[in-house]
Image: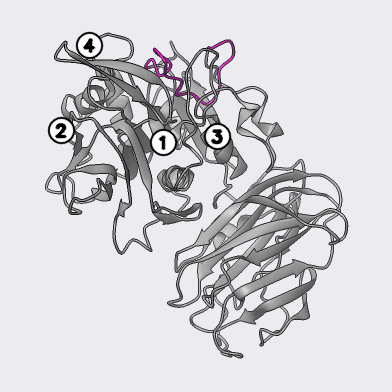
Amino acid sequence: MMGAVEFIIFNNKSIVMKILTNFNLSIVCCGILLFASCAKEKGYNTVPPEKSAWHKATTESTVGVSENFDSGTKGSYATGGVTLSSGSWTFTDALLGNLSNDVKNGTQAARVRNSGKLTMNFDNPNGAGTVTVQHAKFGSDGNSTWQLWYSTNGGSNYTQTGSTITTSANTLQAATFTVNVAGNIRFEIRKTDGASSRIDFDDFIINNYGTTDTTGTGTGKGKKFLFDATKAETAGNADWVIDEDNSIPQRFPTPAQSGITASTAETYWTGAISSWGIALVKTGNTVETLPSGTALTYGNTSNPQDLANYDVFVVDEPNILFTAAEKTAILNFVSHGGGLFMISDHTMSDRNNDGYDSPAIWNDLMTNNSVQNNPFGFSIDLTNISEITTNVLTNSSSNPILNGSQGSVSKLEFNNGATITINPATNASVQGLIWQGGYAQGNTHLMSASSTFGSGRIYVVTDSSPMDDGTGAPGNNLYVSWPLYSHAALFMNASLWLAKLQ
């Protein structure tokens, strides 16, 4: 978030004020079209590739509409109707593509260009819980953006659901939208950038309202995110939790996350990072809190909140040292495939006055453990910086954190954060992502980085301010930062990457 206000004493003299900025598978999304420059681009696969496991796993009991775009014929971009296996669709500046450059699971994909649309001409009578769409860039085309819209009155009026999606990969990626609308509903996919770049859409699935996603993959495959609250994340003026009742974080946020729809506001929960938690739920995932006093373990089958039961562990500015056993648990969790989202603050930001701040605590995890010294290939510097930077990794169009399903990253603001030094010699996978302005994109002056360890993934950012959504426990001075610049896209992309959803 942007904001907690805290005072830091340097050399017992100066005082600095810091303002922390702070599928229920059912309905098939709109027809999916891919952008094409030529009026006609023909080409047929002689041997249809086998459908993906993702597509096979879809169960008819929960799916209201499932469209793979393999039936039907439409070879030009001119607006026209096409009869597909799911029903009648209207393609606007879109066609059914089957060229080698079309990214598809079967024989065809819906290719859309310019400001094209894929529109259902029929309703799913069972509503929509979630909608999942696979999307990819056509050939070597540039990135594109698109949105999903729905109508509950036969197409007379439409409402956008979810956020604008950026298509930046040359392989199919799953975008999942939490809709939670009962009754008759139809969808329309709209390309929004107006450029000639083309998008391939495939495997459009609508999960009926009130059912659950059984695909096992994709952005809405039900990944579980655990937000830590055992390390004094609410000490002082901090409020780094997704929800709290009477200022106490509980395991399950209230009201229940099952009540979250595409239009749910972040104030549904009370926590300075509630926007983050709600955004994860809207993309089909589940969130929980590890409350204060709960054991932090890995491999303990008697602990219902053992890390082995989750996909991603988020720790936002810890203020208490991890014990030896906890450090072993975290590192084993990551090495066995888990995702670790690490957030620190600046040096001398000890909120509970126990002698340790978050840079020291994270460095202790990485250098003082029984598993491996410096396992992630980076360390957090004892620095304090404030700036808005646009120094984002160059040639990063294929990087899923900087150009993922949740948007492209171009700017990051720190309000008193630290920097990172990476050391590829200790872990060749470590990757710098964002640097301070005016510095070369080398191993120092980093503000954000990623790494892998074993079969798991790590993402680190060294200021807690950008996550702040401005609301939290009464009495805390908080500031809105989550929706600013590229913050939401950065942290959501990183979250989904850690969960191996992109």
In the rendered image, which residue does mark 4 sit on?
A: 355
| Closer-to-camera residue (313/398) | 398
Q: Is residue 346 left or right of residue 271?
A: left
Label 4 with label 2: CB-CB less than 8 Å: no
In the rendered image, which residue does mark 3 sit on?
A: 275
Q: Looking at the image, is mark 3 or mark 2 nearer the viewer?
A: 3
Span of residues in magenta = 231-247
Residue type at tag 2 = Asn
Which numbered disc, 3 or 4, marks the residue that appears first in the sequence? Answer: 3
Assess whether residue 237 is covered by the magenta stretch.
yes
Which numbered disc, 4 or 2, marks the residue that appears first in the sequence? Answer: 4
Q: Is residue 480 left or right of residue 24?
A: left
How crowded is the residue under tag 3: few (<14 C-alpha within 10 Å), some, or many (20+)?
many
Assess whether residue 317 is covered by the magenta stretch.
no
Rounded to the nearest whole Å, what is the CA distance between mark 1 and mark 4? 25 Å
Residue type at tag 1 = Pro
Which numbered disc, 1 or 4, marks the residue that appears first in the sequence? Answer: 4
**Disc 4 on helix, strand or loop?**
loop
Identify the mark at residue 466; answer none if there is no mark: 1
Which numbered disc, 3 or 2, marks the residue that appears first in the sequence? Answer: 3
Residue 153 location (% of width, % of height): 88, 56
Give above or below for 463 relative to 302.
below
